[in-house]
Image (spheres, grey):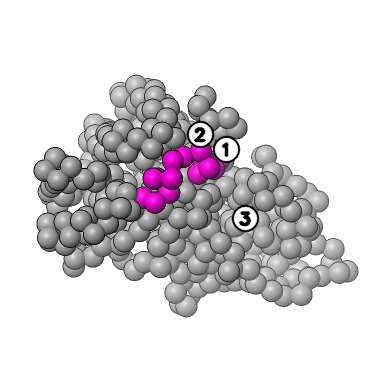
Amino acid sequence: MMYKNPRLIIDSSNPPEPGGIVWRSPSNIAIVKYWGKYGLQLPRNPSLSLTLSSSFTDTRLEYEFRDDTHGGSVDLDFFFHQEPNEAFKVKTEAFLNDLAAIFPFLKQLKLTVRTGNSFPHSAGIASSASGMSALTLCLCSLEDLLFGTLQDAAEFDRKASYLARLGSGSACRSIFPHAAVWGETAVIAGSSNEYAVPVGDQIHETFKNFHDDILIVNSSEKAVSSRAGHALMEGNPYAEPRYAQARQRLALLFDAMRAGDVETFGKIAEDEALTLHALMMCSNPSYLLIHPGTLAILEKVREYRAASGHPVYFTLDAGPNVHLLYPGEIIHEVRAFIEDELKEHCERGYIQEDWVGEGPEEV
Ligand code: PMV
């Protein structure tokens, strides 16, 4: 394992004072999608995402030195929105135990995680990217606080991204401001399957001022999880051409984003959304995650764009909710369009208004 480090052990004759670390980390929306993986959370193709702002997780990691071994495993309490949460505790404990070779000091501490999202729990907005990135940023801050070993900001981010990837693939892209690429591609120097790299400083200002309003068509838990969806790509007859297509589209998208070419960006975003769901429809067994309301919105977006000339585009995650992408200059027009025509397809009229942001912050 890349970051294995047996030296990260606390000297029990000089234990740290109890303390806490807090990070706020946002979600991200992929424009070229990651769908299909191998090995330990490694992507079959590179992906590019925009980092969001208003959909975030706040995580506080509290630690206290303990002198016994707690049966050789991590000792964790977990609170979600102030309430103890057994399901999250079990998942997080398993993740932290898996990191024992990277962070051996975790087993020397009593840990408490207090976490919460900026969006309603049952909104149908995935919190794994924001949640996992917030947690791994806390872990890297803790390593640095105890050992002073992550002073270099780029190295800090890379390690946080690597660890977030182990927790939930797409979470590795949330570490960086504006935009990030995860997965090896010839068009981005230093790109890797192991962690994401920042590309925000290479894209046109237009995309740093982009909005992503998330239209919640249905907030229920998905019938098929992302984990199962990735696994089904292994038997999908279109898998190989799909991975080649994603590589090609990423190169075209990156060019368009450097040039400020909103139209090409939007075309690729929509094509990728439809490809993602087409792959689900032709998996074996096949499945559908879009709802009638999703389709109604997609058609209305295309009609509105044709009629108004406004550059409004859609993308989808692995679910029925629609992400509406558009440049900040047309926010008033688009918000009126949402209100008049799209809101009726949203569950309880719920829309999470979001935009491209500056990435995580330590609070
Ligand atoms: O990170 P995971 O394993 O939840 O997979 C996410 C996959 C998509 O959200 C559909 C696409 C992506 O690149 O984020």
Between 356 and 294, the residue placed more toward the observer is 356
Q: Which amino acid does label 1 sit on?
A: Glu
Q: Callout 2, which amino acid?
A: Gly
Q: Are marks 3 and 2 in contact (CB under 8 Å)?
A: no
Residue 84 x/y as whole percent: 48, 75
In percent of width and height, residue 278 lies at: 24, 34
The residue sitting at 27% across, 56% down in the picture is: 331
User: Which image quadrant: the C terminus?
Assistant: bottom right
Callout 3 amino acid: Asn
Q: How far apart are marks 1 and 2 (CA)?
A: 7 Å
Q: What segment is highlighted magenta in the picture?
A: 197-210
Q: Residue 97 carries which label?
A: 3
- Residue identified by numbered label 2: 183
Crowding near pointer 3: few (<14 within 10 Å), some, many (20+)?
A: some
Q: Which of marks 1 and 3 is nearer the N terminus?
A: 3
Q: Which of marks 1 and 3 is in front?
A: 1
Q: Residues within 10 Å of mark 1 (few under 14, many from 20)?
A: many
Q: Can residue 122 be seen in this view?
A: yes
In the image, is residue 129 part of the stretch drawn in magenta?
Answer: no
Q: Mark 1 highlights which residue?
A: 194
